[in-house]
Amino acid sequence: MLCITLDAPTMRENKAILSRNRAYVSMVELRADMLRKSEIPKAGLFPSQTDLPVILTVRRQRDGGRYTGSEDGRKALLKDLSQAPFSFVDMEVDLNFPSLEYNLMGRGVDIIRSLHDFSGIPRDLPELARVVSSCGQIPKFAVRLSSRADVSEFFHLSELLANIPRKILVGMGPFGLETRLRYRELGSMLTYCSESDPNGIGLPSPEELFRRIEA
């Protein structure tokens, strides 16, 4: 399925983006870290305002996000917003927040454990994916691909993860588009798209991605 990343500074703009692209997508990621501070309280209302499942993400800067506060502040924001009826909450693989994990899983909210590597493909991805999956969570790996050889290696790694039914595998950078077009071959449960691609990681527009996949 195609997941649109809503990364505008206001909820009004985000809703307009979703409305323009509703025909192409089946899931939404709300980037709360991209919102103006005054808009953040509105984020919790959003899951009830759409018929699509919504991922809550509050991304820190080193992972490509715009959250500039303290890590304790980010955790408090995640805890607060995640009490709204989001279907998924994105938590980085190294985020130690067991109380929130237990809360979410007890309420039936799926946790996505994400890793963003802008330097290349970490060698321990298969092992890390198995650890995350064994905890009942969804591994998400977004890595920069800089050559055809990287693309081939990424597809090879995906074969090692074939026994993990729910996972998200994404290639970033100029060679990453192929992984978005062929995400089903990677065994990825979804792939991301955006109208703006604010970090320049190669996010295609929803319409472009939809038409190229369905062509």
Image (spheres, helix red, strand yellow):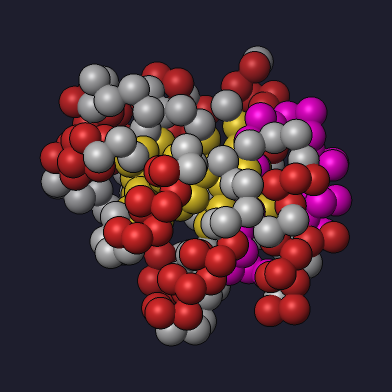
| Magenta-drawn stretch contains 21 | yes
Residue 5 on the magenta span: no
Of 191 and 175, which appears nearest the observer?
191
Is residue 16 shown left or right of residue 27?
right
Residue 29 in the image, given as x and y percentages of width and height: 60, 48
Q: What residue is rendered at 19% in x and 25% in y?
A: 160
Residue at 85% over, 51% down = 16
Quarter where residue 140 is shown? top left
Q: Nearer the viewer, residue 213 or 140?
A: 140
Q: Is residue 158 above or below residue 125?
A: above
The correct choice, above or below, for 135 with respect to 69 in the image is above
Q: Nearer the viewer, residue 49 or 186?
A: 49
Q: Residue at x 35, y 51 (%)?
A: 102
Number of numbered labels in the structure image: 0
- Secondary structure, magenta segment, majority class: helix
Q: Is residue 114 left or right of residue 86?
A: left
Q: Which residues are magenta?
A: 13-35
Q: Quadrant of the C terminus?
A: top right
Task: State the image coordinates of residue 182 (x, y, percent, origin top left).
Answer: 46, 24
Query: Where, by quadrant of the figure, is residue 2 drawn?
Result: top right
Outermost residue toward the top in this view: 215
Vertical placement of residue 69 versus 180, above or below: below
Residue 109 picture location, percent across and down: 49, 42
